[in-house]
Image (spheres, grey):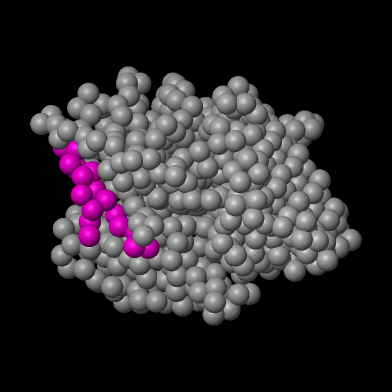
């Protein structure tokens, strides 16, 4: 159990570091890992960012000492040249200093950030962690010193939870980046956008510009640059050759979904515009399989109403892709459990929408991000009462639901205690259960368009003194409908650390890393076991 979150540390730390390299809003990256990592409650600040020269550093340090400094976190180096030191006092007051950027930020933690931090203070003793990784531009390193008041010596899982949280907190506190001038719009091609690239193709990040992404032909390896008119601020979705992505307007405080048509023309879907206070607040969307419908959500976190347990208010809209027949399915539906809404997919006929309610900032030591969703519901696209399909528990892990089949009839979920992937019909009947070959982690079950199910499992080198321990090895397994056979191993490799998504019914994209490459890249393996490491760049989605 202790090792199950270690791979999460590897993935989350990489994702957060990579996010900071892209010139987009903090915690609003376009990486699919954000589907599994809950967006954080906004940080309440007691003053605006200011030049360090105008801050009395000594006074700030004295204030921290007087209120009981508990935590110090240093993040240095890397492609964006981190020089960050964050200190947090027992009462939640924090001070972030960035001397190389001539910047400081101070304030007070609120909501789940504050409650998690103070729980750790009371329960845990000291934690000292150091992590370093080599990147192309040099080394990036992070160190954590935590001086809790509790009697419990933190185990690996607890250390991982604290490290993940503070690393993400520093990323959220980064100053707004200077966004480069918009690029020259792409010429609209008569042959279509990137005509030589076969689809489905892999879309990956371009670290050189927030406006550019790269399409990679999964068969030939050929690449094509795609220039976006606006920098994305969330996940990328593709249907019918078109690409969709959300854009945050800092001035207007709005988010709008943009469409890149198959011919390369680009335009905002104005009817999807919603008001938001910050770009990192939960906002998600999904399209129907034929591209005719779109659903999008917004979650408001009212920290001012209750800093300890702020209410979460969820909105859900559905419309035709041209904006007609717009329906408000949910309107400010409030909960006090810090649950935000994520649409998953439409039913094949477009009449039903499957969605999840995700808990924010889960830090319980029984939690493992084995799947993508913590719960599963269905609701009519025209509105009505939701129907619960499956609910994860503390016993079998939060975020245990990996996927639901495209026809909406089969649910794949994880039981971390038994290391099994379980298939359940939506009527409640059990289909089968598959034991993972990996000893320490199993997760991310994912259906292909035709229903092939793939999942990943990992064994860790527990003798290593690295943090987190290296994978020795990783396994990609699959089983085909009607799911009565034994699961087959597609690939066994020490470099396999994540399952991304099915490219088509024959090829599976997975996360791959090497000792000399810091970024979490993309490999592709076929059902026959043929594999190719396509790129070290971070994947954004599949261009279909």
Along the viewing direction, whichever of 280 and 373 lies nearer the viewer: 280
Identify which residue is drawn at 30% across, 67% down.
Answer: 317
Range of residues picked out in magenta:
252-270
Along the viewing direction, whichever of 342 and 224 lies nearer the viewer: 224
Look at the image and tell me whether residue 470 can be seen. Answer: yes
Identify which residue is drawn at 64% across, 55% down.
Answer: 54
Q: In this view, does 418 lie above or below 272?
A: above
Residue found at the very far bottom of the displayed protein: 305
Q: Is residue 529 above or below residue 112?
A: above
Residue found at the very far front of the displayed protein: 54
Residue found at the very far left of the displayed protein: 190
Q: Position of residue 513 (x, y in %)?
A: 56, 28
Q: Quadrant of residue 323?
A: bottom left
Q: Position of residue 19 (x, y in %)?
A: 50, 42
- In the rendered image, residue 292 lying in the magenta stretch gets the answer no
Q: Position of residue 341 (x, y in %)?
A: 43, 65
């Amino acid at each position: 159990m202790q090792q199950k979150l270690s791979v999460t540390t590897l993935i989350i730390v990489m994702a957060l570091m990579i996010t900071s390299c892209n010139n987009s809003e903090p915690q609003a990256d376009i990486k699919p890992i954000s589907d599994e990592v809950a967006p954080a409650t906004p940080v309440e600040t007691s003053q605006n960012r200011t030049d360090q020269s105008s801050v009395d550093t000594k006074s700030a340090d004295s204030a921290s000492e007087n209120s009981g400094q508990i935590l110090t976190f240093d993040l240095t180096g890397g492609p964006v040249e981190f020089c960050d030191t964050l200190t947090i006092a027992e009462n939640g007051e924090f001070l972030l200093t960035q001397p190389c950027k001539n910047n400081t930020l101070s304030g007070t933690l609120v909501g789940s950030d504050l409650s998690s931090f103070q729980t750790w203070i009371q329960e845990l003793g000291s934690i000292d962690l150091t992590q370093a990784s080599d990147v192309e531009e040099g080394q990036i390193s992070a160190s954590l010193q935590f001086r809790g008041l509790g009697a419990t010596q933190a185990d690996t899982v607890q250390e991982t939870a604290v490290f993940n949280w503070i690393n993400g907190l520093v990323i959220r506190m980064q100053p707004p980046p200077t966004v480069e001038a918009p690029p020259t719009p792409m010429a609209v091609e008569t042959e279509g956008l990137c005509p030589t690239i076969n689809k489905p193709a892999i879309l990956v990040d371009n670290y050189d510009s927030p406006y550019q992404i790269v399409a990679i032909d999964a068969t030939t390896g050929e690449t094509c640059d795609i220039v976006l008119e606006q920098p994305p601020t969330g996940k990328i979705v593709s249907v019918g050759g078109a690409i969709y992505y959300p854009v945050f307007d800092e001035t207007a405080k709005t988010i709008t979904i943009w469409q890149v048509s198959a011919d390369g023309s680009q335009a905002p879907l104005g009817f999807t515009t919603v008001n938001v206070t910050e770009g990192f607040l939960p906002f998600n969307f999904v399209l129907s399989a034929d591209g005719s419908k779109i659903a999008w959500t917004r979650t408001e976190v009212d920290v001012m109403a209750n800093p300890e347990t702020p209410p979460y208010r969820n909105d859900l809209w559905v419309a035709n892709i041209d904006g007609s027949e717009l329906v408000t399915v949910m309107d400010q539906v409030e909960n006090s459990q810090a649950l935000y809404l994520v649409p998953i997919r439409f039913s094949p006929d477009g009449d039903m929408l499957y969605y999840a309610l995700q808990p924010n900032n889960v830090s319980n030591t029984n939690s493992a991000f084995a799947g993508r969703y913590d719960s599963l519901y269905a609701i009519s696209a025209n509105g009505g009462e939701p129907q619960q399909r499956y609910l994860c528990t503390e016993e079998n892990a939060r975020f245990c639901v990996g996927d639901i089949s495209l026809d909406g009839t089969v649910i794949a979920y994880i039981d971390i205690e038994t290391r099994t992937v379980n298939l359940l019909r939506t009527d409640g009947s059990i289909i089968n259960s598959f034991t993972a070959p990996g000893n320490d982690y199993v997760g991310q079950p994912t259906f292909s368009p035709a229903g092939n199910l793939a999942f990943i499992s990992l064994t860790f080198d527990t003798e290593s003194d690295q943090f987190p321990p290296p994978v020795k090895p990783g396994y990609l397994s699959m089983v085909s409908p009607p799911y009565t056979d034994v699961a087959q191993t597609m690939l066994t490799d020490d470099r396999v650390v994540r399952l991304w998504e099915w490219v088509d019914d024959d090829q599976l994209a997975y996360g791959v890393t090497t000792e000399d490459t810091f970024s979490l890249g993309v490999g592709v393996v076929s059902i026959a076991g043929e594999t190719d490491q396509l790129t070290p760049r971070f994947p954004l989605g599949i261009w279909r």
